[in-house]
C-alpha cells in the first residue's frame, strides 16, 4: 500500500490479506472446502476479496483488517506447534512408563468437549 500511495495510486478495491490455509496430504480438505480468511485494508477491499474468493471457495470468512487476517495464521500455526510439542513430550513420557501413547490419545479423544490433538 505505501508503494502504491507514493506513486499517487489509491488502495480502493484490491488490497487485502488472505493467509494460506492448506493441509498437505489430506485428501478430504482442499482449496475449495477449507474456509478462506480475508481482511482488506478498507471495508471495500475486504468486500472485493470476498466476492472474488466466493467464486471458487465454499466458505469465505471476512475479518476487520489485514492485520487480523495475518494474526489468524499466527494463531493457527502457534496452536499447531504447541500441540505437536505436547504430543512429542507425551511420547517421551509414555516411553519412560512403558505406555502406548496412541492408546492414551484415543482414550483422551473420547472426552466429548475441549480435547483436540493436531497430529
Image: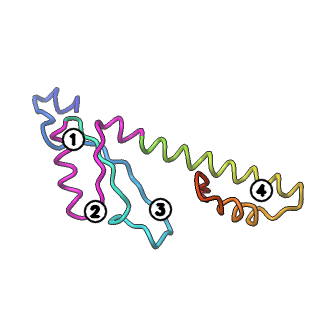
Tell me if label 2 and label 1 are in contact, CB under 8 Å: no
| Quadrant (top left, top right, bottom left, bottom right) of the N terminus | top left
Judge whether 19 appears above or below 31 on screen.
above
Examine the structure image and report whether residue 32 is included in the region drawn in magenta. Answer: no
**Residue 94, horizontal then vertical, whole percent:** 83, 56
Label whose residue precedes the other's in the sequence (3 or 2) = 3
Q: Which residues are magenta?
A: 43-71
Q: Is residue 85 left or right of residue 96?
A: left
Tell me if label 4 and label 2 are in contact, CB under 8 Å: no
**Residue 45, horizontal then vertical, whole percent:** 18, 41
Quote the CA–CA distance across marks 4 and 3.
23 Å
Judge whether 59 appears above or below 28 on screen.
above
Examine the structure image and report whether residue 48 is included in the region drawn in magenta. Answer: yes
Residue that mark 2 sits on: 57
Label whose residue precedes the other's in the sequence (2 or 1) = 1
Label whose residue precedes the other's in the sequence (4 or 2) = 2
The residue at the far left in this view is 8
Q: Quadrant of residue 33?
A: bottom left
Observer-nearest residue: 4 or 22?
22
Residue that mark 4 sits on: 91
Name the mark on residue 78.
Answer: none
Quote the CA–CA distance across marks 2 and 1.
19 Å
Residue that mark 1 sits on: 15
Disc 2 versus disc 1: nearer the observer: 2
Q: Secondary structure at mark 3?
A: loop
Amino acid at each position: 500500500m505505501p508503494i502504491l500511495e507514493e506513486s499517487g495510486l489509491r488502495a480502493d478495491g484490491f488490497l487485502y490479506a488472505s493467509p494460506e490455509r492448506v493441509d498437505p496430504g489430506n485428501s478430504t480438505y482442499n482449496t475449495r472446502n477449507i474456509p478462506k480468511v480475508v481482511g482488506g485494508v478498507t471495508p471495500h477491499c475486504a468486500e472485493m476479496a470476498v466476492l472474488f474468493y466466493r467464486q471458487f471457495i465454499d466458505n469465505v470468512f471476512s475479518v476487520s483488517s489485514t492485520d487480523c487476517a495475518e494474526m489468524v495464521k499466527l494463531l493457527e500455526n502457534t496452536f499447531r506447534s504447541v500441540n505437536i510439542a505436547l504430543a512429542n513430550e507425551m511420547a517421551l513420557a509414555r516411553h519412560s512408563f512403558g505406555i502406548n501413547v496412541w492408546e492414551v490419545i484415543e482414550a483422551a479423544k473420547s472426552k466429548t468437549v475441549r480435547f483436540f490433538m493436531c497430529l
